[in-house]
């Protein structure tokens, strides 16, 4: 999709196997690299340059940039809901205003659900497959990151509907939600890591790897907590030495989970931001080259 004049110098060689058209995914193996894709007319030289995002299809880059933006907006919105909800509740009780609690819960719950919808949309758009990979389908990390959001929004909706009702069911849903968040976040971080390597951006690669490590740490702490829980030594009572150590271990695990969760979210957020900025830069430089 380039103007003829600015294609790279045409050196006539045969396209090696495994190279697909960046615009339509057509298998270009064996064709003359100075020619054009027989399917869509894109200069073959563009597809031979490797799978760097700088050379990816412009339409794909625009979609990717949009998806990453929506993901970041949805994460900010969910955090604001959570923070704003807690602060608002404090203010309301401090001011002694009488607001029916169901009204307040519905408002915050509705906003939270809306940010979850944005999260689903963002991941759905950001994991749109690059046309050059069309024949191979989406990478596994992208599929899990994409469909994992459905499990998350279903669990959040369940929690909101249940409220303080049916405590047992609610506990199960909470486990499903945390599990869904961990798996989806880990897969999303791996997917961003692949994108970061295609930019390439050392910082985004590091950030996405850190996000993955943090979420694995969270999962490990959660598993240990669940094992202690299953051994029915939770909450450990009494004042014996063992009980004190166990109580300490449980609070430490809780703290590890909290910090790991924050780090995981922050690092993935940053990685998505860096990749998006680079994607926009590629698009801008292309717009400059093709006035
Ligand atoms: Zn093509």
Image (cartoon, rainbow, N blue to C red):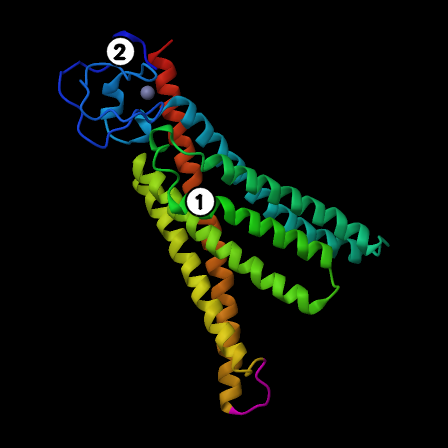
* Mark drawn on residue 143: 1
Mark 1 vs mark 2, foreground winner is 1
Most foreground residue, 27 or 132: 27
Q: Is residue 147 above or below residue 279?
A: below
Q: Is residue 26 above or below residue 218?
A: above
SS under mark 2: helix
Where is residue 61, by image quadrant? top left
Could you say where residue 113 lies in the image, as x and y percent from the top left?
A: 66, 46
Q: In the image, is residue 204 part of the stretch drawn in magenta?
A: no
14 or 273, which lies in front? Answer: 14
* Residues marked 1 and 2 touching at CB (< 8 Å): no
Above or below for 186 versus 224: above
Distance from disc 1 to disc 2, alpha carbons, whole Å, reads: 36 Å
Q: Residue at x 31, y 36 (%)?
A: 198
Q: Which residues are magenta?
A: 235-240
Residue sitting at the far right:
98
Mark 1 lies on a secondary structure that is helix
Nearer to the camera, 274 or 169: 169
Q: Say left or right for 224 vs 278.
A: right
Provide residue 20's location: percent of width, then percent of height.
28, 28
Q: Is residue 239 magenta?
A: yes
Identify the mark at residue 6; answer none if there is no mark. 2
Q: Main secondary structure of the magenta part?
A: loop
């Amino acid at each position: 999709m380039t103007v003829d004049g600015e294609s790279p110098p045409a050196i006539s060689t045969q396209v090696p196997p495994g190279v697909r058209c960046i615009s339509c995914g057509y298998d270009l193996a064996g064709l003359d690299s100075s020619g054009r894709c027989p399917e869509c007319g894109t200069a073959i030289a563009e597809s031979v340059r490797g799978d760097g995002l700088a050379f990816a299809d412009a339409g794909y880059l625009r979609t990717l940039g949009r998806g990453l933006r929506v993901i970041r907006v949805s994460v900010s919105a969910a955090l604001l809901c959570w923070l704003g909800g807690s602060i608002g509740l404090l203010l309301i009780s401090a001011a002694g205003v009488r607001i029916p609690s169901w009204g307040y819960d519905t408002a915050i719950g509705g906003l939270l659900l809306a940010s979850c919808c944005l999260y689903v949309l963002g991941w759905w758009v950001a994991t749109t497959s690059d046309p050059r990979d069309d024949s191979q389908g989406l990478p596994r990390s992208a599929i899990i990151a994409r469909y994992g959001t459905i499990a998350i929004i279903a669990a959040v909706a369940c929690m909101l509907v249940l409220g303080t009702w049916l405590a047992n069911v609610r506990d199960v849903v909470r486990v499903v939600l945390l599990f869904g968040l961990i798996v989806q976040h880990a897969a999303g971080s791996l997917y961003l890591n692949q994108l970061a390597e295609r930019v390439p951006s050392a910082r985004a690669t590091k950030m996405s790897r850190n996000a993955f490590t943090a979420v694995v740490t969270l999962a490990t702490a959660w598993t240990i907590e669940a094992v202690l829980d299953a051994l029915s030594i939770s909450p450990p009572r009494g004042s014996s030495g063992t009980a004190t150590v166990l109580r300490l271990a449980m609070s430490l695990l809780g703290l590890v989970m909290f910090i790991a969760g924050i780090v995981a979210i922050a690092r993935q957020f940053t990685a998505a931001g860096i990749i998006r900025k680079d994607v926009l830069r590629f698009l801008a430089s292309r717009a400059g080259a093709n006035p």
